[in-house]
Image (cartoon, helix red, strand yellow):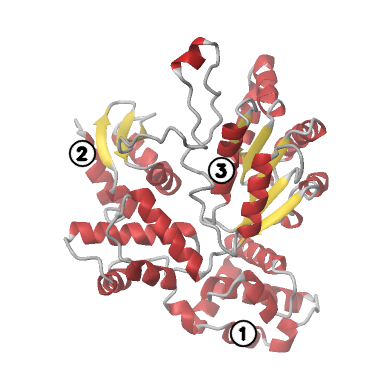
């Protein structure tokens, strides 16, 4: 069967039931060949969201319909807006500089859209932002390494790339390398199975970096060989006063399946966290997203409504904003608070919202879990470590994280704990148990139904 780009895209959307996804609706099919389907989007943010959420499934669909090796390609066709010549973060090479032998900087893996100017600062991320800015201005001098941790979608990657972009602007002679830990591992594996020259090239790429930015370092857990390689890379960079900046979804001491010698090195410099943004910061983030995406007619009242009901992370804020703007455009409706309330409550099957969570408290969860396991609520709050208490306590902490709007520190306080990392550990252990143990999965789901 001969497909057009429009036809294959439409069929894919129908099969995946993703026709209403706001990011996919912003994409336009461009061309289809035996090698793959090309679509275009207007912003790198839309490209990243589609790649994160749908790329694997779309590639499987294309291989099934078109043939082996058929994959999706996403191109960004941005509005033709000239960059200001005095921008401090977008250095350019003039013809005179090129003629004089000053070549443009090498590929760093950075996205120039991620800058400090576009990062919204609030109480939840002020420390990490200040540390990142200081490292950018004085790489190799202090806070080496810088370790930034926090939940999904809170801005860690934005800060990491902003560091790289600022370093390249202020110190253009420095070699900056940005990489995810997954890519680092895959390149390391390729270097093993390829020639010795490839292995030398791999080590040279990372061990000669003046600033190494590595995202999602928690991915190295359980990867013994890659940990050894990164350990040696870390040592050589640090010995030469080259800067290392890492991000993770948890602090170093909670990276349980990582060599102790690596964990200890991660704490040599500065460890800073990013927590979910407060209401005022969420509103400011939404205003920034409107500016980034060219949404010029979104009233402040609508932004405040979104910020009130979406209390998770930045990606949920952005997704909800795009959903509203798309619906208003498609149905030719004025974007009002009432319209937002109607769309978000009725038209989205699984929105990233928190309507039901507002009525659930930590006390209610503790009572339900204590009753199920036939223990006392006071036992859940105690420091006793018997198995009959540890598992129920971890489940209760996990449910507080899933079913309430409480911060990690608030949950820790509800259980008589001082350190919020205890809650992160409990959530990780419970999630792992749910995935591996069918009985635990059933228990947790029964508790959720009882609480709701």
In the structure shown, which secondary structural element does the residue marked by tag 3 occupy?
Answer: helix
Neighbour class for label 1 at 10 Å: few (<14), some, many (≥20)?
Answer: some
Residue 55 shown left or right of residue 425 in the figure: left
Picture quadrant where residue 441 is located: bottom right
In the picture, the disc for residue 98 is none
Residue bearing mark 3: 162
Which is more foreground, mark 2 or mark 1?
A: 2
In three-dimensional space, the C-alpha distance between marks 2 and 3, rounded to whole angstroms, equals: 37 Å
Name the residue rendered at 77%, 82% in the picture. Answer: 382
- Residue located at (78% from left, 44% from top): 262
**Distance (Cα) linking label 3 and label 1:** 48 Å
Q: Measuring from the top left, give residue 183's x and y in whole percent.
A: 58, 35
Closer to the camera in the image, 221 or 40: 40
Which circle, 2 or 3, is nearer the viewer?
3
Between disc 3 and disc 1, the foreground one is: 3
Spot occupied by residue 129 in the image (x, y as percentages of width and height): 61, 53
Comparing 4 with 272, the one in front is 272
The answer to whether residue 316 is visible is no
**Do the residues under discs 2 and 3 have CB atoms within 8 angstroms?**
no
Which label number is shown at residue 6?
2
Q: Which mark is residue 372?
A: 1
Q: Quadrant of the N terminus?
A: top left
Q: Quadrant of residue 365?
A: bottom right
Q: Earlier in the sequence, mark 2 or mark 1?
A: 2
- Tell which circle, 3 or 1, labels the residue nearer the N-terminal end: 3
């Amino acid at each position: 069967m001969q497909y057009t780009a429009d036809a294959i895209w439409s069929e894919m959307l129908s099969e995946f039931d993703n026709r209403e996804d706001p990011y996919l609706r912003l994409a336009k099919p461009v061309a289809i060949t035996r090698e793959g389907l090309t679509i275009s989007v207007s912003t790198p943010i839309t490209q990243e969201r589609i790649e994160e959420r749908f790329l694997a499934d779309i590639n499987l669909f294309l291989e099934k319909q078109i043939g082996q090796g058929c994959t999706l390609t996403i191109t960004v066709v941005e509005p033709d807006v000239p960059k200001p010549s005095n921008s401090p973060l977008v250095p350019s090479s003039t013809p005179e500089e090129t003629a004089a032998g000053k070549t443009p900087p090498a590929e760093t893996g950075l996205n120039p859209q991620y800058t400090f100017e576009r990062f919204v600062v609030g109480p939840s991320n002020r420390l990490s932002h200040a540390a990142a800015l200081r490292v950018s201005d004085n790489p190799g001098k202090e806070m080496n390494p810088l370790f930034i941790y926090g939940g999904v979608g809170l801005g860690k990657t934005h800060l990491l790339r902003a560091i790289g972009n600022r370093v390249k602007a202020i110190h253009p002679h420095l070699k900056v390398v940005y990489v995810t830990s997954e890519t680092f591992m895959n390149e390391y594996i390729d270097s093993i199975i390829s020639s010795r020259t490839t292995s030398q090239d791999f080590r040279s790429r990372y061990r000669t970096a003046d600033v190494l930015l590595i995202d999602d370092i928690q991915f190295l857990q359980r990867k013994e060989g890659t940990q050894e390689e990164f350990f040696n890379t870390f040592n050589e960079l640090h010995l030469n006063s080259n800067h290392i900046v890492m991000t993770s979804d948890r602090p170093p001491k909670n990276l349980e399946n990582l060599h102790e010698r690596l964990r200890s090195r991660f704490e040599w410099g500065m460890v800073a966290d990013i927590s979910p943004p407060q209401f005022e910061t969420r509103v400011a983030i939404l205003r920034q997203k409107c500016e980034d995406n060219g949404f010029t007619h979104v009233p402040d009242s609508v932004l405040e409504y979104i910020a009130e009901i979406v209390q998770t992370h930045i990606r949920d804020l952005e997704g909800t904003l795009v959903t509203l703007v798309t619906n208003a455009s498609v149905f030719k409706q004025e974007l009002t608070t009432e319209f937002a309330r109607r769309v978000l409550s009725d038209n989205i099957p699984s929105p990233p919202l928190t309507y039901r969570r507002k009525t659930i408290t930590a006390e209610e969860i503790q009572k339900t879990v204590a009753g199920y396991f036939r223990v006392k609520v006071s036992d859940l709050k105690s420091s006793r470590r018997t198995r009959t208490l540890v598992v129920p306590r971890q489940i209760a902490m996990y449910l507080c994280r899933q079913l309430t709007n409480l911060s990690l520190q608030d949950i820790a306080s509800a259980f008589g704990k001082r350190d919020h990392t205890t809650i992160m550990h409990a959530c990780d252990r419970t999630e792992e148990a749910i995935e591996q143990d069918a009985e635990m999965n059933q228990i947790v789901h029964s508790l959720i139904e009882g609480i709701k």
